[in-house]
Image: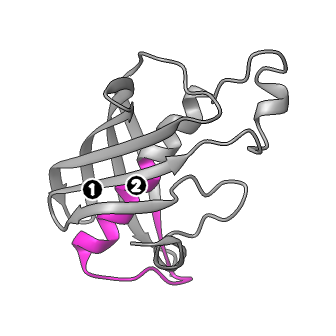
Amino acid sequence: MDILEILDYLPHRYPFLLVDRVIELVPGERIVALKNVTMNEPFFPGHFPHHPVMPGVLIVEAMAQAAALLSFKSHGVKPDENQVVYFAGIDNARFKRPVVPGDQLLLEATITQAKRGIYKYRAVARVGEQLAAEGDLMCAIRSLT
């Protein structure tokens, strides 16, 4: 999936869209996506001015956005103004390596459970071969009407 298709499936927009490309997607199973981390990110001037580091909560959000793409593709629907994927929970979150400008964050999510529009995932974020973050995520597809 390129950025235009990602924009069709996620409601997020700049500065909160954190997935640039999907390089692998197997509906009902797994997704591999990319986030290119640049110095132009709006959070770097404040986190931290003399040593820019991507906030851990945004790494988790990037993993959740990749998982949301997998949810919609697995559910077989495109979201519209009446549907949203809520980030419902995270367990076992761990941060192993700082993510800095110039890094390419590889986001992977694998479905571990799916039932009635609620999905659970095992997610990891890597920079190269190094583990940057990991956690167990839960997302729910819900209708707004």
List x then y, in percent, for residue 24: 26, 61
List x then y, in percent, for residue 5: 46, 78
Q: Amino acid at mark 2?
A: Ala
Is 100 a magenta residue?
A: no
List x then y, in percent, for residue 48: 78, 20
Q: CB under 8 Å between callouts 2 and 1?
A: yes
Name the image quarter holding residue 101: top right
Q: Is residue 49 above or below residue 65?
A: above
Tell me the residue that label 1 is attached to: 31
Q: Secondary structure at mark 2?
A: helix
Q: CA distance from mark 2 to mark 1?
A: 7 Å
Q: Is residue 120 above or below residue 126?
A: below
List x then y, in percent, for residue 79: 45, 79
Tell me the residue that label 2 is attached to: 66
Residue segment shown in magenta: 64-85
Q: Residue at x 46, y 56 (%)?
A: 86
User: Quarter holding the N terminus?
Assistant: bottom left
Q: Residue at x 76, y 24 (%)?
A: 47
- Between residues 136 and 83, which one lies in front from this camera angle? 136
- Between residues 93 and 115, which one lies in front from this camera angle? 93
Relative to 37, 127 lies left or right: left
Q: Secondary structure at mark 1?
A: strand
